[in-house]
Amino acid sequence: MLKKLEDLAEKAGIMMTDTENLGIREKTSSRDLVTTNDLAVQEMLMEECSKLAPGCSFYCEENDMQDRDILHGECFIIDPIDGTANYVYGLDHSCTSIAYLEDGIVKCGVVYDPFRREMFSASEGKGCFLNGKKAGAITDRTLGDAMTCFGTAPYDEDTNDLTFRLAQLLYENSRDVRRTGSAALDCCYAAVGRFDLYFELRISPWDHAAGSFIVREAGRHASDMKGEPLDLTKRTSILCGSNAAAERFLELSEPFL
Ligand code: IPD
């Protein structure tokens, strides 16, 4: 299954890099964009995944009639293009994310960035891979030595104050902070040690299902902002990265939550 998902993610990447007619539209707000490529990639992935697991269910970003029974049987959680705003603005930092689940448990996941041609992948119990090469041991940096990032939960105004209070806390207690615009890639970068910590207060299952699994397979921390396991059935906060840095940030942020 993993190899097949990697092939499909690559096919999605070819579609993504054809940016001639993006057909950009706003969804719920001016921050929430969709392009014709988001829809076309999702359609292709759903069609191909149905062939891999006939009768499976789907939980996808661009699909209002989501079949949400992710807890039973085979299911794919898909973000056809994560980092859509980056994509629209030509920032070349976006990806396709696919997680495959059996009875609610992620069995494998892929996140593919066609701009850097980087395939992050993992299957249960086998560790985390980047372009087919197993990620080596990653330094478990302390928060003080950490390069960190955060997401702004851009579709939820009610999280703004807390997001930026926590971002300031992170900045004051780490080496520096970044905001990249792709939650799935933030997770993968936290998996391979490009980031030591990533947090966001509200993201959807398709943003992190594959990425947070890849983080866990790398032996790194992946939880919500209360330190609880991530729930794939609903929107959630997220904290990923070095175990030492995550533990410290959970302590520091607790009074604010
Ligand atoms: C968004 C990106 C962004 C994150 C948002 C996500 P989308 O995904 O991952 O970095 O801050 O929370 O929703 O909408 O571009 O697929």
Image (cartoon, rainbow, N blue to C red):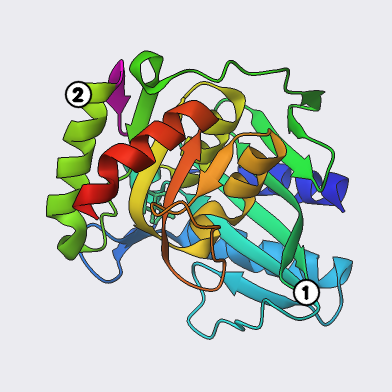
Question: How many residues crowd mark 2 within 10 Å: few (<14), some (14–19), many (20+)?
Answer: few
Along the line of sight, the residue nearer the viewer: 82 or 179: 179
Which residue carries the number 2 mark?
A: 172
Q: Nearer the viewer, residue 223 or 63?
A: 223
- Note whether 169 is above or below 139 in the view shown: below
Main secondary structure found in the magenta portion? loop
- Tell me if I can see residue 180 in this picture: no
Q: Residue at x 63, y 64 (%)?
A: 77
Local SS, label 1: loop
Q: Specify few, some or many for label 1: CA neighbours under 10 Å numbering under 14, 14-19, or 20 or more.
A: few
Q: Spot the residue most to the left.
A: 161
Compared with 66, 229 (above or below) is: above
Q: Amino acid at mark 1?
A: Asp
Q: Quadrant of the N terminus?
A: bottom right
Occupied quadrant, residue 74: bottom right
In front here: 116 or 182?
182
Q: Which mark is residue 103?
A: 1
State the extent of the magenta-drawn residues as a range. 174-181
Q: Position of residue 31 (x, y in %)?
A: 23, 57
Residue sitting nearer the eye, 54 or 133: 133
Q: CA distance from mark 1 to mark 2?
A: 41 Å
| Left or right of 154 in this view: 242 | right
Residue 179 image-quadrant placement:
top left
Task: Name the residue: 37% across, 27% down.
Answer: 148
Q: Is residue 140 above or below residue 69?
A: above
Evaluate whether residue 11 shows in this view. Answer: yes
Contact? badges 1 and 2 (CB < 8 Å): no
Residue 177 within the magenta-colored segment of the rendering: yes
**Which SS class for mark 2?**
helix
Q: Position of residue 181 (x, y in %)?
A: 36, 41
